[in-house]
Amino acid sequence: MDKSRAYRRSRLAAMKAKARRLYPHDPSARNANHLAACSCWMCGNPRRYKMGESWAEQRARVRDTDALRDRD
């Protein structure tokens, strides 16, 4: 499958736009090719930076409270 240069450039522009939306503190969109590479306090694990529960812990807490409510 041969991709033209124009297609690759358009996909890179789309990935850079997404990177700017996800990481507004990175205006040059350096993480466009690997969006999970940023580990700053805004993007990283909240437990590492003492900001609260991680997303997985929040989901587990909600799931557990819903299960308790449904059981009653």
Image (cartoon, helix red, strand yellow):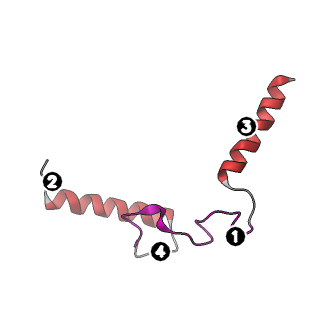
In the rendered view, does 55 fall on the left or right side of 7? Answer: right
User: Mark 2 and mark 1: span between their CA atoms?
Assistant: 42 Å
Residue occupied by mark 3: 63
In the rendered view, does 15 fall on the left or right side of 6? Answer: right
* Amino acid on which the number 3 mark rests in the picture: Arg
The residue sitting at the front extreme is 48
Rendering quarter of residue 18 = bottom left
For label 3, count other residues whose C-alpha is less than 10 Å away and answer few (under 14), some (14-19) or many (20+).
few
Rendering quarter of residue 13 = bottom left
For label 1, count other residues whose C-alpha is less than 10 Å away and answer few (under 14), some (14-19) or many (20+).
few
User: Mark 3 and mark 4: span between their CA atoms?
Assistant: 34 Å
For label 4, count other residues whose C-alpha is less than 10 Å away and answer few (under 14), some (14-19) or many (20+).
some
Camera-near label (4 vs 1) is: 1
Report helix, strand or loop for mark 2: loop
Instruction: Give the magenta part as a residue range.
Output: 30-50
Q: Earlier in the sequence, mark 3 or mark 2?
A: 2
Task: Please check the rendered image and state whether residue 60 is part of the magenta-colored stretch, yes or no.
Answer: no
Residue occupied by mark 1: 49
User: Mark 3 and mark 2: span between their CA atoms?
Assistant: 44 Å
Q: Earlier in the sequence, mark 2 or mark 1?
A: 2
Camera-near label (3 vs 4) is: 3
Q: Residue at x 78, y 30 (%)?
A: 67
Report helix, strand or loop for mark 4: loop
Q: Residue at x 12, y 51 (%)?
A: 2
Residue occupied by mark 2: 3
Q: Earlier in the sequence, mark 4 or mark 2?
A: 2
Residue occupied by mark 4: 26
Q: Earlier in the sequence, mark 3 or mark 1?
A: 1
Q: Residue at x 47, y 66 (%)?
A: 37
In the rendered view, does 33 fall on the left or right side of 54? Answer: left
Q: Residue 48: where, in percent of width, then height?
A: 68, 67
User: Mark 3 and mark 1: span between their CA atoms?
Assistant: 24 Å
